[in-house]
Amino acid sequence: MQAPPFACFVTQLGRCAFFVGRNGRILCGYSGKGLKKLNQNLRNYGLTEALEQQAGQYRHGHIARVLEQHRELYRVIGGEGELAAGISGRLAHQADGAMDYPVVGDWVLVDRVEESSGQGVIRGILPRKSMLSRQAAGTTKARQAIAANMDTLFLCMSLNADFNLRRMERYLALAWESGATPVIVLTKADLCLTLQERLRDIAMVSGGVDVLVCSAQSQEGYRELRARIRPGETAALVGSSGVGKSTLINRLMGKEVLATREIREDDARGRHTTTSRQMLLLPGGGIVIDTPGMRELQLDAADLSKTFEDIEELAAGCKYGDCSHGGEPGCLVQKAIREGELPGARLESYQKLKREMAYQGLNARQLEREKINAMFGSKGEMKRMRKEVKERKRP
């Protein structure tokens, strides 16, 4: 017996599940093997008993997972297979911003529009266990959701000329805030002539996060990468355009499912290929989410304490509690820099990201005040210094 394609909700009693219509009448039911067969499709995509219990608390729709998003239309996978779905008017009305809309990886509650149509309506989103987001590109302060409900985040960066430690620090800050476990993946090892030097550099910023090295030509690292994605678990790949995420996914899938392009000769960067977020089921179990390259990575929320744990541990031992790690006496951070234990560029990155986080959500006037306080200590001190400079210039 198939589930009715029209609007209904699912309730479960013991080993039996019932599809109940809007009028409260039981339309059909599953028990034993039938229920197991219905849910197995979703278990491959990470469905757990806890998620089933959460879905059972809602009296509308049946559980599904978002596979792909194209503007206001979604592709979801349910117990009966894939279907296209839009969001309900009520869900759109109750949303306070983009973060309240479904995103790839979300578990949602879906109704069918009518029996003759394969399109559904998303009426609710189940609580997310993890969420990767950033500030939307441009001048807007809105947050942009990237993916949800990941167990692992593969932070991808190539080992050629596009290698950038400061960018990796940003990715790590985003990853720790998301709630997923970060793993650094260094790609294009066959193009790197200074691999050991690069590995020493990445160890300075990784904070103990596992680091994998991959090469498309030698197949190095792919077995280790695949072992990190267990059946029922979800991993997302993030990184700038052209680092080789599509190549990684093709290797994991065992076939060419995503387009790839050669690197450019003028700047050694890969070409942008992925244009939308999508979820793929791996052979043998496990799920991966591919994301478009992030040309502009502005932080809306980030965990700097884990990303810069080395600096914060040193700062805790400074002589003054409000040490700015500039020229104050007894600064252990500056001491570590002088003794070569901490790169000065890492402190600069830490301070830059702290300022960036402090400025989030401020209007123009508040932003200007914070910048003045950071540079001069106060607006009064700024005026005093300006007056002093003018007096010095007088003949």
Image (cartoon, rainbow, N blue to C red):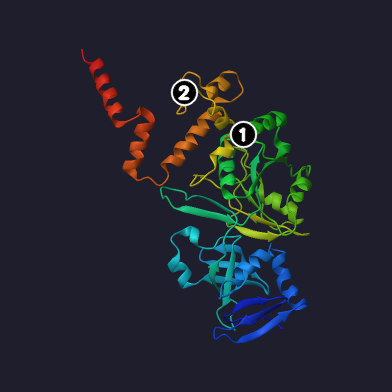
One can see residue 76 in this view: no
Picture disc at residue 326: 2
Q: Report the side of 34 relative to 165 (left or right).
A: right
Could you say where residue 126 lies in the image, as x and y percent from the top left? Answer: 57, 64
Relative depth, front residue between 327 and 68? 327
Residue 63 sits in quarter: bottom right
**Label 2 vs label 1, nearer the camera:** 2
* View extreme (left): residue: 395
* Crowding near the residue tagged with mark 1, few <14, some 14–19, many ≥20 C-alpha atoms within 10 Å: many
Could you say where residue 275 lies in the image, as x and y percent from the top left? Answer: 57, 55
Residue at image coords 20%, 12%: 395
CA gap, disc 2 and disc 1: 21 Å
Q: Please, what is the three-letter code of the amino acid marked with disc 2?
A: Gly
Q: Please, what is the three-letter code of the amino acid marked with disc 1?
A: Val
Picture disc at residue 342: none
Report helix, strand or loop for mark 1: helix
Q: Report the side of 299 relative to 42 (left or right).
A: left
Could you say where residue 231 lies in the image, as x and y percent from the top left? Answer: 75, 58
Give the vertical position of 368 relative to 55 (above or below). Answer: above
One can see residue 105 in this view: yes
Give the vertical position of 199 relative to 226 (above or below). Answer: above
User: According to the image, label 1 marks what residue?
Assistant: 205
Report helix, strand or loop for mark 2: loop
Relative depth, front residue between 195 and 389? 389
* View extreme (top): residue: 395
Residue at image coords 72%, 58%: 286
Could you say where residue 42 lies in the image, as x and y percent from the top left? Answer: 69, 67
Q: Report the side of 359 relative to 226 (left or right).
A: left
Of labels 2 and 1, earlier in sequence is 1
